Amino acid sequence: MHSLPETGYLRIWQVIGKPATGNAPAIPAIIPVSKSTFWAGVRSGNYPKPVKLGPRITAWRVEDIRALIERDAA
C-alpha cells in the first residue's frame, strides 16, 4: 500500500505515477492508468473531481483518492 498523508492534496503525477528522468527518480502509480484514461474517468464520474488550487494547479483531495482505492478494492 502507498503511504498517503492523512489529509492534503495530490497532483495528477502523484496519482498516476511518473517515469524516471535523467535527474528525477520514478514515482510509482497509485492508480496505474494513463493521464487521458484518468481524465476520462473524472469526466464519467468513475474518478473523483479535482480541486483547482490556482490558475494552473489542479489537485485531488487525499481523502477522495483513499475512498477510490477502498471502493476499487471491494
Image (cartoon, rainbow, N blue to C red):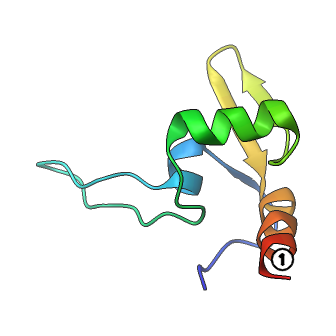
* Picture coordinates of residue 9, whole percent (x, y): 73, 51
- Indicate the quadrant where residue 39 lies: top right
Residue sitting nearer the eye, 45 or 27: 45
Q: Is residue 60 left or right of residue 13?
A: right
Q: Is residue 28 visible?
A: yes
Q: Amino acid at mark 1?
A: Glu
* Residue position for label 1: 70
Depth order, front residue of 14/6? 14
The image position of residue 58, as x and y in percent, is 69, 31
Residue 10 place in picture, x, y as percent: 66, 51
Dot 1, crowdedness within 10 Å: few (<14), some or many (≥20)? Answer: few
Q: Is residue 7 left or right of residue 59?
A: right
Q: Is residue 19 above or below residue 53?
A: below
Q: Residue at x 64, y 26 (%)?
A: 57
Q: Looking at this view, is 37 or 5 the one in front? A: 37
Task: Residue 50: name its quadrant.
Answer: top right
Q: Which residue is drawn at the image coordinates 60% and 61% (left, top)?
A: 31
Q: Would you place residue 4 above or below residue 47 in this image?
A: below
Name which residue lies at 69% across and 33% down.
40
Q: Do we see residue 51 in this rendering?
A: no
Q: Is residue 44 left or right of residue 30?
A: right
Q: Is residue 32 left or right of residue 59?
A: left
Q: Is residue 20 above or below residue 60?
A: below
Q: State the residue at coordinates (53%, 52%).
A: 33
SS for dot 1:
helix
What is the quadrant of the N terminus in the image? bottom right
Asked which quadrant contains residue 51, the reply is: top right
Which residue extends farthest left?
22
User: How far across and how far down the image is residue 54, in percent?
Assistant: 72, 21
